[in-house]
Image (cartoon, rainbow, N blue to C red):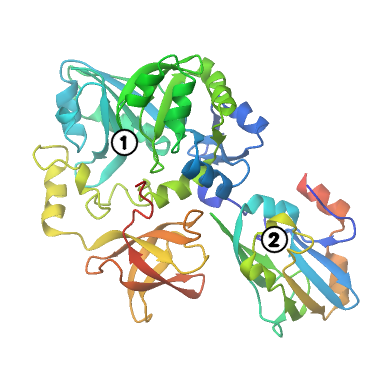
């Protein structure tokens, strides 16, 4: 299972990449693999305020659905429009073109509660 | 994602049995092929190998196969076997010629169903039956509770395996691995034969649950891996429970626990065609009444616009959202039609082609009431 070392992770299988005050968020390789073929992604509209651990959206696969939780509090600044027509990007490239939303981080101290790659790998095993 | 570890994924397939799950003779073969194993009806089975969409397409376009060893296999013998099965099942058993089978139902005594089944007639007094894994113990107990005088019932599930090979090329591939290819190819739909496949002695039935041509092959457990590996080598795609479900919904085929149940009428599910109009059977009075008077709801197909996933329990509304007209019993994303499709029990007044909407997790997704056979091989 691919777990990039430069990202942070939640125990609910989201990843987060921090650049300045912006967090890019998606679901992990493990999560996409467990879900199977993803056919629809429900994403928040930019401008929406979210709190850490609040439902950010949901991912529907051929047979099941899972909610996606925000790892941090802040304001949604962008969502990945490409997923509208090509939700399979989440399966094929979960850490790259399959990203889900960007959030402007309101409270950087929340990042300390997230797992690094080693801790997430340990949680998966 | 859902917070608890392992708390997401194919939860629809997870049953809550108290005992640890059983494995089939093909368990190691599934793991070696990369199958993602889940618990289903008390067995560890692959939900998918490569992916549900790829596996569904393999069955629609070429040939795929499923380990269905978890389903239970029963044999009936004795001078009263025919009379016994006429009482125990809804379809006309006497109409079966030797070497043929049919889809049928196991009714209870109050108009509901114990299970849906396949019955094969091998001779004057010899029959076989295949029943759902989830109902195995219940079915056996029920069948023993009926008048079994002069009938012997043998449950030979534990010592045998079963592989369903399905798809437009399935019979051709099975024939190519047999010493009797012409018999394999000429056997009619629901016909049965004893035949070698990949060097393995099989009880073969030309049936399945995907809407495609194909064979369901029963063999001894000791031969199961040889049969499976031989079919893989012959070009049959290994498929999991996920695609088995998308394929059966596309084909309009009900699943016990979703469209059928102890307290659900087969008439509402549209299965009147497998209920005899001429014979008396267990609970026939109640099923006949339902047929004569109609049922409050009827099972239909619902085709959604777009790719949202309908799921059991979701409510169906009139297209303007003004009133609830029914509830979804099964739902999948159809790899064939590339949209969400569902079975739904709708008010009996609702006609085909009626526009509707399904409440998918808070969003009203427009759709249409359609024939539940979304796919029919032409």
Picture coordinates of residue A10, whole percent (x, y): 77, 61
Q: Say above or below: B98 vs B325.
A: above
Which quarter of the rendered picture does the N terminus of chain B lie within? bottom right
Q: Which residue is label 1 attached to?
A: B117
Q: Nearer the viewer, residue A117 or B36?
A: B36
| In this view, B10 is above or below B136 | below
Q: Residue at x 14, y 53 (%)?
A: B291
Looking at the image, residue B150 lies above or below residue B254: above
Please count the marks in the image: 2
Residue B162 visible within the image: no
Chain ID at mark 1? B
Query: Residue B193, percent across and down?
Result: 34, 20
For residue A89, which numbered disc appears in the image?
A: 2
Task: Give the SS element for disc 1.
Answer: strand
Q: Chain of mark 2?
A: A
Q: Is residue A8 left or right of residue A34?
A: right
x 63%, y 43%: residue: B50
Crowdedness of circle 2 by 10 Å Cα count: few (<14), some, many (20+)?
some
The Cα–Cα distance between marks 1 and 2, rounded to whole angstroms, is 41 Å
Residue A38: percent from left, percent from top: 61, 58
In-front residue for pair A45/B377: B377
> In the figure, residue A43 lies in which quadrant?
bottom right
- Seen at 59% across and 25% down, the residue is B233
Mark sitting on residue B75: none
């Amino acid at each position: 299972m691919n777990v990039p070392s430069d990202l942070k992770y939640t125990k609910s299988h989201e990843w987060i990449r921090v650049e300045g005050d912006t967090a890019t968020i998606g679901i992990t390789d493990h999560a996409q693999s467990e879900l199977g073929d993803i056919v629809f992604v429900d994403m928040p509209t930019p401008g929406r305020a979210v709190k850490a651990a609040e439902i950010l959206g949901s991912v529907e696969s051929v047979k099941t659905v899972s909610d996606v939780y925000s790892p941090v509090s802040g304001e949604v600044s962008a969502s990945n429009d490409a997923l509208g027509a090509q939700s399979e990007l989440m399966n094929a490239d979960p850490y790259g073109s399959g990203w889900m939303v960007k959030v402007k981080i309101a409270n950087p101290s929340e990042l300390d509660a997230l797992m690094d790659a080693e801790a997430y790998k340990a949680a998966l095993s | 994602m859902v917070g608890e570890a392992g708390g997401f994924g194919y939860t629809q397939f997870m049953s809550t049995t108290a005992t640890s799950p059983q494995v089939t003779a093909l368990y190691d073969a599934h793991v070696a092929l990369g199958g993602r194993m889940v618990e289903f009806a008390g067995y560890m089975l692959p939900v998918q190998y490569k992916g549900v969409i790829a596996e569904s397409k393999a069955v629609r376009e070429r040939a795929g196969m499923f380990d269905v060893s978890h389903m239970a296999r029963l044999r009936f013998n004795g001078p009263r076997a025919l009379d016994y099965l006429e009482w125990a099942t809804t379809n006309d058993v006497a109409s079966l010629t030797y070497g043929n089978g049919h889809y049928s139902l196991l009714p209870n005594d109050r108009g509901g169903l114990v299970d849906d089944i396949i019955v094969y007639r091998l001779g004057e007094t010899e029959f076989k039956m295949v029943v759902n894994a989830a109902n195995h113990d219940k079915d056996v107990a029920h069948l023993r509770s009926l008048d079994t005088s002069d009938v012997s019932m043998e449950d030979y599930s534990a010592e045998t395996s079963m592989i369903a090979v399905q798809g437009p090329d399935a019979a051709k591939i099975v024939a190519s691995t047999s010493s009797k290819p012409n018999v394999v190819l000429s056997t009619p739909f629901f016909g049965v034969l004893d035949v070698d496949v990949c060097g393995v002695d099989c009880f073969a039935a030309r049936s399945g649950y995907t809407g495609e041509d194909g064979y369901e092959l029963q063999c001894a457990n000791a031969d199961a891996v040889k049969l499976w590996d031989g079919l893989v080598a012959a070009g049959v795609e290994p498929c999991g429970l996920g695609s088995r479900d998308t394929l059966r919904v596309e084909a309009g085929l009900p699943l016990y626990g979703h469209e059928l149940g102890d307290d659900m009428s087969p008439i509402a599910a549209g299965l009147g065609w497998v209920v005899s109009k001429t014979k008396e059977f267990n609970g026939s009075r109640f099923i006949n009444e339902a047929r004569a008077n109609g049922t409050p709801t009827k099972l239909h197909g619902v085709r959604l616009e777009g790719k949202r996933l309908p799921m059991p329990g979701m409510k169906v509304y009139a297209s303007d959202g003004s009133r609830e007209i029914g509830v979804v019993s099964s739902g999948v994303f159809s790899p064939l039609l590339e949209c969400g499709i569902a079975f739904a029990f709708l008010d009996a007044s609702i006609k085909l082609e009626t526009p509707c909407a399904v409440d998918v997790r808070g969003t009203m997704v427009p759709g249409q009431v359609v024939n539940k056979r979304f796919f029919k091989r032409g």
